[in-house]
Every structure is written in C-alpha cells, then in structure tokens.
C-alpha cells in the first residue's frame, strides 16, 4: 500500500505542478493571446506568400520555357540563386538591403521574401508537372490545328494540374514551417510568441513545446487533407 500511496502522491504533485505551469505560462496576464495572435500572423504570411509564389512561379516557368535565350537565362538564374541560398539570408537581405532605406511593415517584407523564395520552388513544381505529360498529348493537339498556347492551356495544363496540386500543397506545408524564422525581424509570429512567453516566465519547456504542438497539429491537418486530395485524384484517374 505504501507504493500505491507514493504513486498517488506523485500523480497529485505532477497535476498540481502542471496546472500551475499552465496558468503561469498561458493564463496569467492573458499570455495565450500571444500564441493566438502569433498563429494569425504565421497563417497570414504563409497564405500570402504561397499565393505570391504561385504568381512568381508561373511567370518563371514561362520564362524558362521561352524560345529566347535571355528570358530562359533569367529564369534559370533566379531559381538557381533562390534554391542555393538559405531562407534566413534571403529574409535579412530583403529587409536590410532591398527595403533598408524604406519604412515598411516587417510582415509585408516577410511576405515578399517568402513569396520570392516560394516562387522558385513553385516554378520547378509547375515545370515538372508539365514535363510529366507525354509529348504525344502536345503533338495530338498541334495535329488538330491548335496553336502552341491553346494546346498548353486546353490539353497539357489540365492534366498537369493533377500532378502539380499535391506537390504544391506540400510546398505550402514546408512554407508554414519555414516562417518560424521571421522572428529575426522581430515579427511576433507563433514561434516568437512562444519565445516571448519563455523570456517572461523563465520556463524553457512549456511555451516552446506548446508552439511545437500547435505547428504539429496544423501540419498534421494539412498532411491529412493532402493525402485525401491525392486519393481523390487517383480515383479520378482510374475512371
């Protein structure tokens, strides 16, 4: 019976300590609002950046498929530089170099930086999706009298979208995790909010673990949604 009482006392002490830590880190002074506001900023940056990345990626894809050498070179250099340098470095260059002499909202700077970064990867995703379509589809369209642009728009792209969409969703998942570095610009995103709570409570465990759990839940939800989308697309291919 002594060991049973010891276990019970340990459980009671653990629950009391856990409840006290939860109150001190998240309830006191309404600190949970920091996490909520930080999550909003993370989502805003991620959504705006991926939309900007889709636009940039589409333009770069057109440049790289151009008949002319200069546009192809521009597209290649853009992708090569972006993919060959760290995201943190790109973020700092965008803020301190490109917009260094202009007073601008750091959130907007982060959106631009991540949008430009995402554009390079999106362009590769779109290009790979187009190349995955058999050349016979293009030849069939041209043989029917369609122009090159009409063949691409009406025949190739509708088929390529099925290959592009799941990978594009995965790029969005990666982008959400990468936004954790915007704290370098003192943007109070989700990660920065957890770090701020940690600096106030001097608790190095619970705030950062809570942030990691929130990220995990978001990513897990999106991953399940992407898996469902891929299954739906596979079913449509079998019909």
Image (tube, rainbow, N blue to C red):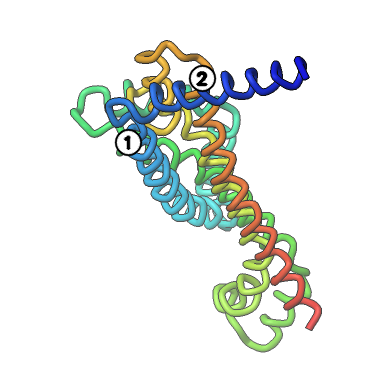
Residue 146 higher or lower than 35, as above or below:
below
Q: Nearer the viewer, residue 46 or 168?
A: 46
Residue 186 in the figure: left or right of residue 203: left
Residue 223 in the figure: left or right of residue 234: left
The number of callouts visible is 2
Please tell me whether mark 2 sits on a helix, a strand or a loop: helix
Residue found 67% across the figure and 72% down from its top: 159
Residue 138 in the figure: left or right of residue 68: right
- Disc 2/disc 1 C-alpha distance (Å): 22 Å
Q: Considering only order in the chain, which callout, 1 or 2, is on the residue closer to the N terminus?
A: 2
On the image, the x and y values in percent for residue 196 come to 37, 20
Label number found at residue 17: 2
On the image, the x and y values in percent for residue 42 come to 41, 40
On the image, the x and y values in percent for residue 120 come to 54, 43
Label number found at residue 201: none
Please tell me whether mark 1 sits on a helix, a strand or a loop: helix
Which residue appears farthest toward the top when viewing the image? 202
Residue identifier under label 1: 33
Residue found 38% across the figure and 14% down from its top: 201
On the image, the x and y values in percent for residue 5 come to 70, 19
Q: Nearer the viewer, residue 191 or 171?
A: 191
Residue 124 higher or lower than 154, as above or below:
above
Label 1 neighbourhood size at 10 Å, few (<14), some (14-19), many (20+)?
A: few
């Amino acid at each position: 019976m002594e060991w049973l009482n010891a276990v019970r006392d340990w459980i009671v002490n653990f629950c009391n300590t856990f409840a006290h830590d939860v109150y001190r880190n998240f309830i006191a002074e309404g600190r949970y609002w920091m996490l909520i506001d930080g999550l909003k900023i993370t989502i805003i940056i991620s959504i705006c950046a991926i939309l900007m990345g889709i636009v940039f990626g589409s333009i770069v894809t057109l440049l790289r498929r151009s008949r002319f050498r200069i546009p192809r070179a521009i597209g290649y250099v853009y992708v090569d530089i972006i993919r060959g340098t760290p995201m943190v470095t790109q973020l700092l260059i965008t803020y301190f170099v490109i917009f260094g002499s202009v007073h601008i909202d750091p959130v907007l700077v982060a959106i631009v930086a991540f949008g430009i970064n995402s554009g390079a990867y999106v362009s590769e995703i779109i290009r790979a999706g187009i190349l995955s379509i058999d050349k016979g589809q293009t030849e069939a369209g041209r043989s029917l009298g369609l122009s090159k642009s009409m063949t691409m728009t009406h025949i190739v792209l509708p088929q390529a979208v099925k290959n592009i969409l799941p990978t594009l969703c995965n790029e969005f998942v990666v982008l959400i995790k990468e936004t954790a570095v915007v704290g370098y610009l003192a943007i109070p995103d989700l990660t920065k909010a957890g770090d701020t709570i940690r600096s106030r409570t001097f608790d190095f465990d619970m705030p950062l673990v809570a942030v990691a759990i929130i990220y995990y839940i978001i990513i897990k939800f999106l991953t399940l949604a992407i898996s469902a989308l891929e299954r739906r697309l596979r079913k449509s291919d079998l019909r």
